[in-house]
Every structure is written in structure tokens, then in C-alpha cells.
Image (tube, helix red, strand yellow):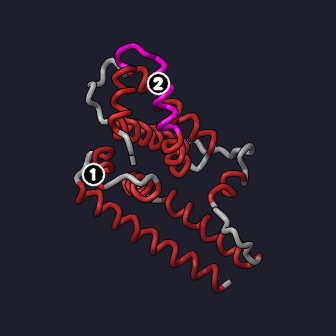
Amino acid sequence: MNPDPANDRVHWQALQSGDDTALNRLIARWERPLLAFAWRYVQDSADARDLVAETFVRLYQQRQRLRPDTNLSAWLFTTLTNLCHNQHRWRQRHPTVSLDNAGLDQANTSAMPDETPTPDEALLHNETMAALGAAIAELPHDLKTTLLLHHYEGLSYREVGAVLGCSERGVETRLYRAKQRLRLKLTDVLRTTVTT
């Protein structure tokens, strides 16, 4: 996931030493992968941006308290994961409907191939992607987070374990359980889609 941890360490130590511009360099490096994770978790672009911004605010606020050898990627994803989970729980207790993003986020989830599909193929693809997104959203927090960090963000089992505070074997078990649940859910959805 992190191609140059030494570079991150240099920026992190500079930030701790009082070079506030180092935060901009860390944001440039980490904003995109954090946004991708947050969007997949909360499935709302505005909320994802807010959660990532809050993650960087907390990094800045905690810069003097954290150790110089802090695993920055693990700290960022752990903080963001907790913020996403808290926001998700809050949304479940306080449901709302956003008219600003109605339909826009769903359109961003399907990457269309270069060849133009037939209308039936496009409809099936969109329905499948929507079903996958809904099935992932319904996973319990620990399974959803493990799946998103490993499959979508490309973190290794060790990196995911560092974020979630579990062993590599625990990560493997969570991934297996997540895939099993998705397989069951999507089999039912696709069977219904094909037969209707």
C-alpha cells in the first residue's frame, strides 16, 4: 500500500518538529486512498470528504502526543475506520435522505468498459454493482472494514491487522467470513435478477 514509508516518516517527523507544511505533503500522499476507503464505507461523497478531513485534523492535533516511529498508514486508517464506524452508527439512529447526492454516487461505482455494452448488459452490470455495494454496506463493521482495506485499498494482511488490532490469521478469517456472506447475499440477488 505504502510504496515509500521512509518518505512518510520524513514528513511525519518534520510535522512533529513544527514544519506545518509537512501536513500538506502527507495530505497529498494519503488523501486519495483515504477518500476511496471512506466512500466505500459510507457511500456518500460529502460524508467521505468530511471524515477524511477530520482524520487529518486529528493527526495534526495529535502530532506531539504520537511517537516519532508511529506507523502512519495504520494510524490514519485506524482513525478513519473508527470515524466511519461512528458516523455509520449515528446515521442508523438518525436516518436522512440527501437530495444533493441522489443517484450521483451510485453512478460513480460502476466503471464501464471501453466497448459500449448493450442496454441489457449495462442494466445487469449496474444492478450487480448496486447489489455488491448494498451487500458490502450490510456487512458487520469488522468484516466490512477488513474487506475494504484488503481488497479495495490493497493493504496486506499484516497492514490490515495493524489497523484492526488483530493477527494476520484473524484478517484471513474475517475475509473468508465476509466473502461467504457476500456470496450468499449476491447469489440470492442475482438469481432473482436473472429470473425476473
**Residue 4 at what x, y percent from top left?**
37, 40
Residue located at (41% from left, 52% from top): 149
Three-letter amino acid code at the position of disc 2: Leu
Residue located at (53% from left, 47% from top): 36
Q: Give the range drawn in magenta.
A: 15-31
Left or right side of 2 for 196: right
Q: What residue would you read off at disc 2?
A: 23
Frontmost of labels 2 and 1 is: 2
**Residue 70 at what x, y percent from top left?**
29, 31
**Residue 145 at what x, y percent from top left?**
41, 52
Of 171 and 21, nearer the camera is: 21
Residue 79 lies within the magenta run = no
Tell me which corner region of the image, top left, top right, bottom left or bottom right, holds residue 66.
Answer: top left
Visible residue check, residue 93 = no
Three-letter amino acid code at the position of disc 1: Arg
Secondary structure under tag 1 reads helix
Left or right side of 47 for 122: right
Q: In this view, does 50 lie above or below 36?
A: above
Q: In this view, does 138 lie above or below 164?
A: below
Q: What residue would you read off at disc 1?
A: 158
Tell me which corner region of the image, top left, top right, bottom left or bottom right, holds residue 17.
Answer: top left
Rendered-image quadrant of the C terminus: bottom right
Q: Is residue 77 above or below residue 110?
A: above
Are circles 2 and 1 on residues that touch, CB within 8 Å? no
* Number of residues whose C-alpha sits closer than 10 Å to that of mark 2, classed few (under 14), some (14–19) or many (20 or more): many
Residue 28 lies within the magenta run = yes
Badge number at residue 193? none
Measured in 3D between alpha carbons, the distance from the residue under mark 2 to the one under mark 1, in whole angstroms, is 26 Å
Residue located at (49% from left, 48% from top): 37
Of 57 and 142, nearer the camera is: 57
